[in-house]
Amino acid sequence: MFNLLIVDDEKLTREGLFENINWSGMNISEVYTAPDGKEALALMKNTRIDILLCDVKMPHMDGIELASNVRESYPECKIIFLSGYSDKEYLKSAISLKVESYIEKPIDISEITNVISETITQLKNANLKKQSDDLLLSGLVESFPLVNQEIALGLISPGLNYDTFRAKYSPLYFSWDNNSLFAVLCIHPDRKSLYSKNSKDLINVIYTFLESSSNPLPIDFFAGQTAGGDIVLLINNATGNALETMSSLLKEVITEKLQLSVTIGVSPLCHSLQELPLAYEQSCKAVLQSFYLGAGQIIAFKNDLRGKKLPVQYFENLNINLDSTLRAFSFLETEQFSDIENIKKHLYILYKNMMERTLNNNLLPFEEFDQYNLAEIRELILEGMRAFQTLGNDLYDLKIKEAIHFVLWNYNNCDLSVKTIADHVGLSQNYLCSLFKQNTNVTVNDFIIQVRMEKVKKLLKCTDLRLYEITEKVGITDPNYMSALFKRCCGQTPSQYRHSRPM
């Protein structure tokens, strides 16, 4: 339904039009009247008027001036002139103001009805087109982020068929060509941040910033979220300085908006769309360098990251003790091998062995361990080595600390003895026994038994291993001897302990 305003200084004309036309039958819901142009403009400030039916000659403000104001302020309003004069100047003004029609007085009701009906048809058609355009635009706006993600993830896929790709997305969504410079950024949320890999907050913040006036470097880009929660950002017309500036600003915005620390890996510039999969791989390799360099940084890919791999037998030949572990971490920090996933797997095995040997039950799953960088893993393992019983007591003699550590890492060796411990720490057997008892109030042999019995307890309650299997795992050769030893230390047989105590 539409609203119409009749403006005429003749009261009889206003009232005659108001009363003698079936307005509702023409989809006119409200009809307003005004005696001159000034009152008409005042009314239109607070009321939507779709059709203006006005006399040309009026006091205070004539129809030409009124129409000029309406056309400027309300361009969608349809204007129909009424006039008792057929002056050419008025006609010229009507044309320049894009008036719908020029009706001469005296007014013929059928003529004015026909003109208004035609005008309403025009309004309906215009409204339908606007609704259709709005719906299309709304659909496009809603689909842009999703399609942009599809494009970003598609462009980094190896073996992409570019003809099929362009046919699907060009020209509405995708207009890049090969005459440009491209770069790929991999934006990786760091482990210590409270962030779900399924969260859409990160990519929304990135889109909002890059498309806003807050970004001083407007760029043409596509961004998508990978299955692992990282964001891949593809940039067109990139330069080295602009990339560095934009990456720094983007990192600051993410930290501010989400309290989220991210590492950003930046690929080298490339010259064709076909190079984008390789550029993405390079940006991911740059992110992996945070394993050595620490999280929360912007890291550019370097060619020397390509092929430096850990020696195959390195961890297999590694002695499990504090000194060897410290040397291993120093070696990894210095060499910075490229096969980081392989290094993490070996370090996790080392970590598990440490946790088992120090009787610690708080084992991290690999999925969580995998998020730690090298410095964090170093501290995790060394802290575990120091965690068992008296190992961290600063009052102990350094040689006794070393002896305790050796027992913790070798209790499962059936050849473990006072002699092997003394040889390891460089003391005579007698002096080791004396110094050990002086520092710990227990003998070396009793300490070995204590460690082994604690491990037996754990295996009895946490596994279904048979007694002879448990015996072998704690470095004792005779199951009967182990049972007698366990009963002497714990007051129960191994079987009684397994079935009588809660987990």
Image: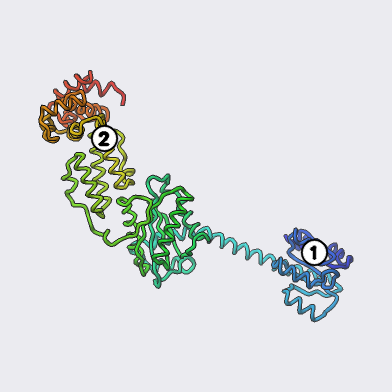
Residue extending farthest to the bottom is 88
Question: How far from the left and from the top, in percent, is residue 433?
Answer: 14, 26
Quarter of the figure with residue 410 = top left
Relative to 260, 46 lies left or right: right
Question: How far from the left and from the top, in percent, is residue 349?
Answer: 24, 42
Q: Which amino acid does label 2 sit on?
A: Arg
Q: Can residue 111 be seen in this view?
A: no
Secondary structure, mark 2, is helix
Residue extending farthest to the right is 12
Say which residue label 2 marks: 386
Q: Is residue 466 above or below residue 284?
A: above
Q: Nearer the viewer, mark 2 or mark 1?
A: 2
Q: Which of 345 and 427 is in front in this view?
A: 427
The quadrant in which the N terminus is found is bottom right
Q: Which residue is drawn at 31% across and 54% down?
A: 289
Kindly report the distance in space between the C-alpha atoms of the residues bearing marks 2 and 1. Answer: 89 Å
Mark drawn on residue 40: 1
Number of numbered discs visible in the structure rendering = 2
Question: How far from the left and from the top, in percent, is residue 453?
Answer: 21, 26
Q: Residue at x 44, y 66 (%)?
A: 168
Q: In this view, does 429 lie above or below 37?
A: above
Q: In this view, does 13 lie above or below 339?
A: below
Q: Which residue is drawn at 36% across and 69% down?
A: 272
Display coloring: rainbow
Q: In this view, does 337 lie above or below 168?
A: above
10 Å crowding of disc 1: few (<14), some (14-19), many (20+): many
Q: Nearer the viewer, residue 339 or 67?
A: 339
Question: How far from the left and from the top, in percent, is residue 474?
Answer: 18, 30
Q: Which amino acid does label 1 sit on?
A: Ala
Quarter of the figure with residue 109 = bottom right
